[in-house]
Image: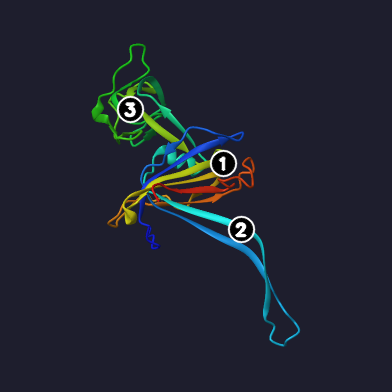
Amino acid sequence: MSQEVYQYGQGKVEIAPIVDGVIGAWRWLGDVSAMALAIEEAKFSHNESYSGEKSEVREIVTGVTCNGSITLQSLSAENVAQFTRGTNTEKAAGTVSEEPLGTVAAGDVLVLDDFGLSNIVVIDSTGTPATIDPSHYEYDGYNELTFNSLPDPAPTMPLKVSYSHSAYKRVALLNGQKGEIALRYKGINLAEGNKKQYVQFYKVSPGLLQNLELINNGQQLAQSPVSFKPLKDTSKPADGELGQFAQVVTVGY
């Protein structure tokens, strides 16, 4: 093989939770547009004091640190929850019957409990409830009703609303605990005949999203960089063939 080996990689990045030292199920992060690793030495040097030139005569390495980064293009609920230490919940499509709206006045904007609503029916609180004509209110397509007017004569309060709602996912940001993960890259090197590459970091401390772009005016999709720090996996033998930090595999070298 040529001594010149170039890198132009594409591939999938996957993560798996580590609980009590056991790696769980792997999950693909979706489109990741960049991935890199920086390895640095922590060190100091000693300068001699006998020649008058104060030349460096020793360099002492005190440790090694690794820092990685990936750029997420896929901002799925699962990815946002993972990298904001949040929790992700899913709600199946369903129906709600007579959710209370309280006492309503013209101009009120009311926030409902669910999203993606249809079949909206608003009633009052008379013994035989009267239905409020939909011309009196607007639905914003998310979870709000705006009452522009009320019937005359005024309906008996409180008003109540029934509706169907879509399935949806909800992420509560920054309400979870930081945990360790395993991270692996399964890719190909386009610069070397599409040779397969496999990189696995055994134990990783994941960072937070460095930004979460929500409005874009440029000519590219939102990108969310995330840092990660590979840690030493002391459950693996220090003199083992695969080391304690990571392995890098090139197939068909």
Amino acid on which disc 3 is placed: Ser
Q: In the rendering, at what x and y percent does residue 39 appear?
A: 54, 59
Disc with the residue nearer the chain's start (3 vs 2):
2
> Tag 1's secondary structure?
loop
Disc with the residue nearer the chain's start (2 vs 1):
2
Q: Residue at x 27, y 56 (%)?
A: 219
The residue singled out by tag 1 in the image is: 180
**Residue in the foreground of this view, choosing between 111 and 165:** 165
- Among all residues in the image, which is located at the extreme right? 50
> Tag 2's secondary structure?
strand
Amino acid on which disc 2 is placed: Val
**Residue in the foreground of this view, choosing between 226 and 161:** 226
The residue singled out by tag 2 in the image is: 64
Q: Is residue 153 left or right of residue 224?
A: left
Q: CA distance from mark 2 to mark 1?
A: 20 Å
Using the image, determine if residue 69 lies above or below residue 75.
Answer: below
Q: Residue at x 55, y 38 (%)?
A: 176
